[in-house]
Image (cartoon, grey):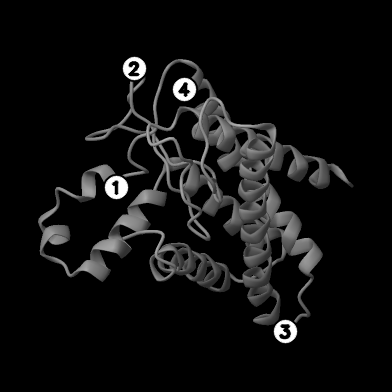
Amino acid sequence: TRQWLWVGLLILALIGFTAIRHAEISDSGASAPVPGMGMDMGMSGPMDFGGPGGDFGPPPPGMGGGSASNSMTTAQRWEIALVAAAGVVLIWAVQAVLLSEVSMLKGSAPRLGHNLQIAIWASLPLALMAAVQLVFMAAGGTPGEAGLSGLVRDWDLYQRSPGFVQSLLLSFTGNLTLFWLWSMMLIYFGGRYALRGRSWAVLLVIASWTIVLTVAPVLTGNID
């Protein structure tokens, strides 16, 4: 059916609107940087859910781009929303390509269209996280540390590590949320049952995606 298409459009609209709201209330007057494949905003304030820097998760992938404030123009809002939506589409495309490994490792030709549908459905938890963040910001919450990155700075391992390793730790823990783990579970179920792939092949895809999600923002300089 075309249900997956409408769900994809709804996810893009929700994430775009969340990116605009984040930009409007950002203390720096600018939206979060686009980390290529990841997510880079947390939450803190009256509804704190975390530890130091409190938060219960970063924003959906691709959120950010450009400067913004409460008085930004309509063109600036559209730019922020489109950049955020483009980041999500890029993530879907990369995940669809990676899921091709599941089919090829069992001797079948990959179906990118099918893989894309799996990637879209697997991103529903991130869209739910965006909806929760909208409620959080409407209640007066302000952006804080992403994921568990507010805790990793206190680790002895982090403080003793070289700069590149610190960036990798920040990148990984910034994306480590229950919503992200839920999304990875959906990718596993999609590869295992929708594509009828072997469990080790699907786990290889998840490991590959985690590496891309962690390393890409560091190599592009979005996390330092």
x, y (%) of residue 207? Answer: 47, 68
Pointers 4 and 1 in contact (CB under 8 A)?
Answer: no
Say what secondary structure mark 1 lies in: helix
* Amino acid type, mark 2: Pro
Say what secondary structure mark 2 lies in: loop
Position of 1 compared to 146: left or right? right
x, y (%) of residue 118? Answer: 70, 56
Q: Gap in Å between the C-alphas at discs 1 and 2? A: 20 Å
* Amino acid type, mark 1: Ser
Q: Of marks 3 and 2, which one's residue comes earlier in the chain?
A: 2
Residue at which label 4 appears: 136
Callout in the foreground (3, 2)? 2
- Furthest residue toward right: 1
Position of 5 compared to 204: left or right? right
**Front in this rendered view, residue 118 or 195:** 118
Residue at which label 1 appears: 149
Residue at which label 2 appears: 46
